[in-house]
Image (cartoon, rainbow, N blue to C red):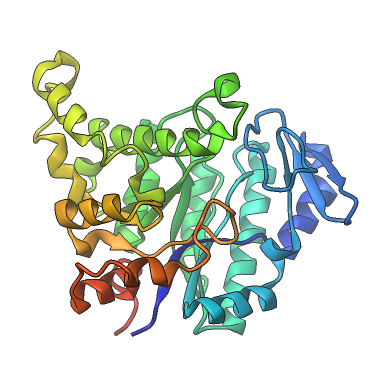
Amino acid sequence: MKIINTHAHWYPQEWVDLLEKEGPANGAEMGRNARGEVSFNFAGTQFRGADEEAGRGKIVFRVDQIDINERLKTMDAQRVDVQVLSLTTPMVYWAPPAFGLKLSQAYNDACSAVHLKHPERFLAMATVPMQAPELALKEVERASKLPGIRGIYLATHINGTNLDAKEFFPIYAKCEELGWPVFLHPGNPIGGARTSRHFLVNLLGNPYDTGIAAASLMFGGVMDAFPKLDVMLPHAGGTFPGLIGRINHGATIRHELKHMPKPPEAYLSRFYYDTIAHNDHFLMYMIQEIGADRIVLGDDYPADMGYKKPVEVVERLTQLSQAQRDMILGGNARRLLKLAA
């Protein structure tokens, strides 16, 4: 059985080059640090990169985020057979629509190219310019024909707009038609100035934002309108699974939620969740309450807030049966990504 890491980020060199070349004309502040690595800054960017030289609001594209050969060495050391590549902050939503589309096309083409070069090691999730839904839909259609692209990757909100906005429904409909899962990831998470210190933008902002995204998809009718659409929540679902009791109670007493056709807890199993909980007891709670068939391996490569040894995280859960362990390490991802047996 192949071990599949569903949560791994990559910046292709050609994507970084395009951003450095054309970003300034499209509102981005580009630079280089003392090591010659490219940095990015935009007024709407709240996330701080791991590089301390980056400074508040800047993102540095480090060598380990770009170099495929180094990545392959790390995967071998981790015993990971396949990484599912995805773009992370800064995404492309900050850009004017035409440049957002150009960045998306460059990213998706690069991911397909690296898949063709290493077909047994890399798959990818498409990036699309969600700030212009009509362009995003066209890019979904184009990217669906690229080898190695197996789904779509979205931020937990689009420039402050929650994911249940009606303008996004045609994209969900196309993904459902294609059998494409939707993978989510926080981008410019909730909190603003209140999370600007102590790395709270990541520690708390990211999981809170994931909870808001999941609740919006649920309460906003997306999960009901598209019953065959698969959605994966990062970082073990953020606040969503841990607060489901409170959410469920609210749906029984609040008039704003009377439209729900079933209790919120019934939607827990509509989502997939990665293993990045940093708490074995909570991860086991999720497996027991939601099911081992809804959990997929992730490590947030190469972020320092991820796992260095993602396979060992699953292996040390001694309560799991071998069948459950196999599902989490690769079987569920194979089903989710529609991979041949």
Q: Residue at position x 54%, y 45% from top?
A: 135
Q: Is residue 130 left or right of residue 216?
A: right
Q: Is residue 282 visible?
A: yes
Q: Residue at position x 73%, y 54% from top?
A: 61
User: What is the tally of numbered marks visible in this picture?
Assistant: 0
Quarter occupied by residue 181? bottom left
Q: Residue at position x 51%, y 76% from top?
A: 78
Q: Residue at position x 67%, y 61% from top?
A: 65
Quarter occupied by residue 45? top right
Q: Is residue 333 visible?
A: no
Residue sitting nearer the eye, 180 or 191: 191
Q: Is residue 129 left or right of residue 38?
A: left
Q: Position of residue 81 (x, y in %)?
A: 47, 80
Quick one: quadrant of the C terminus?
Answer: bottom left
With respect to residue 330, does 139 lie above or below? above
Residue sitting nearer the eye, 283 or 130: 283
Quick one: quadrant of the N terminus?
Answer: bottom left
Q: Is residue 119 left or right of residue 64?
A: left
Q: Residue furthest top?
A: 255
Q: Position of residue 195 (x, y in %)?
A: 56, 26
Q: Position of residue 240 (x, y in %)?
A: 29, 38
Q: Position of residue 255 (x, y in %)?
A: 14, 14
With respect to residue 190, does 68 lie above or below? below
Q: Is residue 184 left or right of residue 69?
A: left
